[in-house]
Amino acid sequence: MRTSSKSGVTALLLCILLGPLGFHRFYVGKTGSGVAQLLTLGGFGIWAFIDLITIVTGKFTDHSGAVVSLSSSSGSSGSDKGTTHHTQEKPRRAA
């Protein structure tokens, strides 16, 4: 499954703050449904609430069908890129 280049955190914040106006849908390129949400105030709040749930559960997609993910790994699941691993060195005994 493809991961969108759009930020899931941004989509989530737009949905929470401006959900009934459909701004999160405009952000991911879903202009048609964004206009519909704008005109119906997010389907009277119900549609915006459903979008909020789909964003949080990782099922919200952008205009091309790619998943808008809340994780910062942008599609590299299982990768530890950018993670620093620290190992503790054992003290040496004097001979």
Image (cartoon, rainbow, N blue to C red):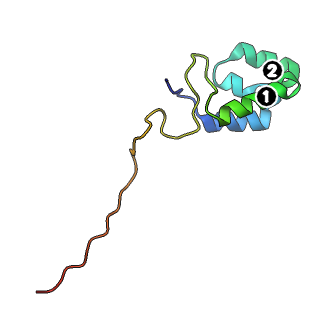
Please tell me in which quadrant of the rendered image residue 67 appears.
Answer: top right
Amino acid at dot 2: Gln
Determine whether, in the image, residue 28 is placed left or right of residue 49: left
Q: Circle 1 sits in a helix, a strand or a loop, which is it?
A: helix
- The x and y percentages for residue 9 are 63, 39
Q: Is residue 7 above or below residue 81?
A: above
- The x and y percentages for residue 62 are 61, 22
> How many badges with numbers are in the image?
2
Amino acid at dot 1: Ala
Instruction: Please name the residue shown 54% across and 40% down the image.
Output: 71
Q: Nearer the viewer, residue 48 or 5?
A: 48
Q: Nearer the viewer, residue 93 or 3?
A: 93
- The x and y percentages for residue 3 are 51, 27
Instruction: Please name the residue shown 72% across and 33% down the image.
Output: 53
Do labels 1 and 2 touch, CB within 8 Å? yes
Instruction: Please name the residue shown 57% across and 29% down the image.
Output: 6
Looking at marks 1 and 2 on the same chain, the residue that comes earlier in the sequence is marked by 2
Q: How busy is the neighbourhood of tag 2: few (under 14 within 10 Å), some, or many (20 plus)?
A: many
Q: For the residues marked 1 and 2, what is the alpha-carbon distance in whole angstroms?
A: 8 Å
- Please name the residue that numbered disc 1 is placed on: 48
- Please name the residue that numbered disc 2 is placed on: 37
Please tell me in which quadrant of the rendered image residue 48 appears.
Answer: top right
Determine whether, in the image, residue 82 is placed left or right of residue 27: left
